[in-house]
Amino acid sequence: MSSPKYQSSKGTHDILPDDHLYFSFIKKVVRHRCREAGFRRISTPMFENVDVFTHSLGEATDIVEKEMFVFESKSGKRMALRPEGTAGAVRAYLQHGMHQLPQPVELYYFEPFFRYSRPQKGRYRQFHQLGFEVIGEQDPAVDAQIIYLAHKINQDLGIADRLKLQINTIGGPEDRKKFHEDLVNFYTGKERSLCADCQKRLHKNPLRLLDCKEEDCQILASMAPKFDHVMSEETKEHYQLVKEFLDELKVPYEENPQLVRGLDYYTHTVFEFWSQQDGAQNATGGGGRYDGLVELMGGQPTPAMGYAAGVERTIEYMKEAGIRPPNKDRIQIFVAQLGHIAKKRSLSLLNELREHGLNTVGSAGKGSIKSQMRMADRLQAHYSLILGQIEVQEGTIILRDMDKGSQETVPIDGIVDMVVDKLGGKKLKNRTLWEE
């Protein structure tokens, strides 16, 4: 069979019904954990003025240099599809006066993002991230709580044992200024051993030399000066408290002095969840403190901390672990009918079953009962209700248990309460959609 004429664009993918089970489950876990911790959901536009990202992420970052989808609006403004969530959240924090709210402001999101990168397993050009931000508090306890929240979500999803938490500190601006000088001095004269990207980073963003994945660059990075030689007492104290708080919360971690993250706005604590098997090559997510970003974007000096994880990569880990989310989409009742009178009666029965919160499908065509039962089997319905002209006249209906293969004829009056009881549910009178 030849391929269909039209295919999804490279780097994009259709989220089919089976995968939506994972998306829905992850979203519910994130919503539950974030609500417990006092977070409120935010959604920012899918595109922003390009300066929102170039100014905050850094001109020398891979996202800005290589991966942003940039376009010009009809009015001539340069816009970009959002490549990450923090810059938009901070822009919204400033635009809507959230600095006037009780601090810190705690926000979470679950949204699609866009990056023009090489597609690979679990990584797409249109992808989804879950994330949360705490804006307005500098205490290292916030760092530990953010990491703990991410860890708990990984536990809830059943993938925590497949991941290893990596943590580090990159200090404040003065620490990094001294460290940048040390790195430039060390790498000068060794440019030929660096990959093409790192040769550019040497003078633009030397900190990024430490987390390059190229083998030769990793060898040099292992010999490069260490950050702890320039670390201020304030930075040391902050980092030490973060580790103490993580110990108190019983969150296992591994210190990684080469972990720096890829965006310019990070300060102090940075962290990532790496694959136990593949390391950084298959990290699910990470984050860190960004105490200078609000000021950089025009606000008053405001400390902040955040985290984001790739949803598609998380789903890959769940599948590898054999985790199947609850399927609330499964059909519970299939209503089969034969004849005009039975079809009329089945319409009101279908609606009544649905109003009681049961996932119900009915055959709308004129197929035989045998063909309708095959459809019920394919849908994996728990029960089938079979209604013909004789049953309508006698006020009865056939109730078939699809799992056991048994059936009985029962009065049609009270059939809804009967199947609700059999399915372990409850009568949902005056049920409203927002009670789901």
Image: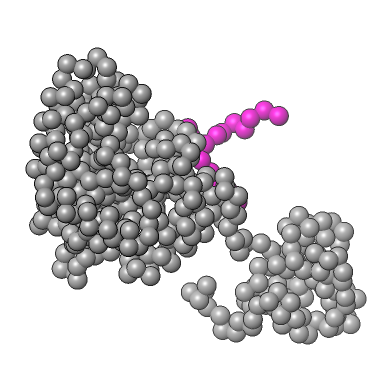
Q: Is 257 colored magenta in this rendering?
A: no
Residue 418, x across and y down, in percent: 75, 81
Task: Tell me which residue sits at (15%, 50%) in the image.
Answer: 235
Front residue of 287/79: it is 287
Outermost residue on the top side: it is: 192
Task: Tell me which residue sits at (14%, 38%) in the image.
Answer: 229
Magenta span: helix, strand or loop, mainly? loop
Residue 298, x across and y down, in percent: 11, 52
The residue segment tinted magenta is 1-18
Residue 77, x across and y down, in percent: 21, 40
Q: Is residue 365 left or right of residue 71?
A: right
Where is 79 relative to 219, above or below?
Answer: below
Front residue of 87/272: it is 272
Q: Is 8 colored magenta in this rendering?
A: yes
Which quadrant would residue 191 be assigned to in this image? top left
Q: Is residue 194 left or right of residue 406?
A: left
Front residue of 392/61: it is 61
Which quadrant would residue 339 be assigned to in this image? bottom right
Residue 434, x across and y down, in percent: 48, 74
Task: Tell me which residue sits at (27%, 50%) in the image.
Answer: 288
